[in-house]
Structure formats: structure tokens, C-alpha cells
Amino acid sequence: MSANTNQVKALNKLITTLYDGENGYKESADDIENTALKARFQSLAQQRYDFGHEIKPFITQLGGEVDKGGSAAAGLHRVWIDLKSAVTGQDEEAVLNEIIRGEESAVKTYQEVLADNAFSDSIKTTLTNQLNKIQAVLGDMRRLEKIS
């Protein structure tokens, strides 16, 4: 595979991760009654949508096509969140645990993509900025989990 093909594949992996995160946050916002958390999750869903749109032009510049839709595993993860929320009566701690798990997965994916590819400076800067923001959200969610 050419470097561009590998980079397009890696960027599409991030797009899938972002779609999954966006959908996970939307589902979580629907599953929670706490209005502050609901608003935060809706904001984070929008952030992940925006991140995806920051990456899409890079895929086109590299001569690739943007993958559409989330991963099958994420679909199962969202179903699990729905089930757990129904069983636990929309328990904030349970939802936060799942959010944390999703964020840890996103951080790992970003780190792997950045480590395994020789991206241009503009792509690397964008991805690093997104990773930093996701890591900050992960820290926030861990703090929220401890107090809920």
C-alpha cells in the first residue's frame, strides 16, 4: 500500500471513531435526566461531528474517499448503553462509565494512528489538537464519575 492509502485508511478509522463518539453522546444525552449532563453530552456530540469535518478535507487531499457510518462494534456498544440505562434506571454513574470506556478507546485509536503514520504537519497538528481535547474530556468524565 502507498503512504497515501495507509493515511487515508487511518484517517477513515478516525472518522469512524468520531461517528461512533457522536452517536454515543447523542444516545447518552437521551438516556440521562440530569440537564447539565444532557447539555454537555449534546455539546460533545457536536464536537465529534465537527472533528470529523476537520478531517474529511485531508482524506480528499490524499486522494481518498470518506467512509460513511459508524462501526458495528460501536452499534453494539450503543445498544449496551441503552440496555444498561433501562436496567439501571438511567443511572448517571453507569452512563459515565460507558462514556469513559468510549473515550479511552478514542484516545487509543488517535495515539495509534498518529504513531503509525507520517502525516503532513497540518494533519498532525489537527489530529494532535483533537486528541488533546478528547483527553481533556476523558479527564472531565473521570472526575464526574468520582463525584456521582
Image (cartoon, helix red, strand yellow):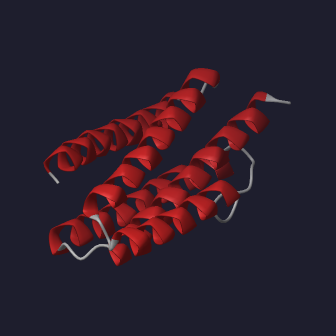
Name the residue: 35% across, 60% down.
95
Above/below status of 49 relative to 130: below
Q: Residue furthest right?
A: 1
Q: Give 126 or 22, whichever is nearer the viewer.
A: 22
Q: Give 64 or 14, whichever is nearer the viewer.
A: 14
Res 135 quadrant in image: top left
Q: Is residue 64 visible?
A: yes
Report x, y in % for residue 131.
Answer: 40, 37
Report x, y in % for residue 3.
Answer: 75, 28
Report x, y in % for residue 123.
Answer: 51, 36
Res 72 quadrant in image: bottom right
Above/below status of 116 relative to 82: above
Above/below status of 96 relative to 120: below
Name the residue: 36% across, 43% down.
134
- Quick check: 134 left or right of 136? right
Report x, y in % for residue 48.
Answer: 43, 58
Name the residue: 19% across, 49% down.
144
The N terminus - image quarter: top right
Above/below status of 57 relative to 31: above
Name the residue: 75% across, 34% down.
6
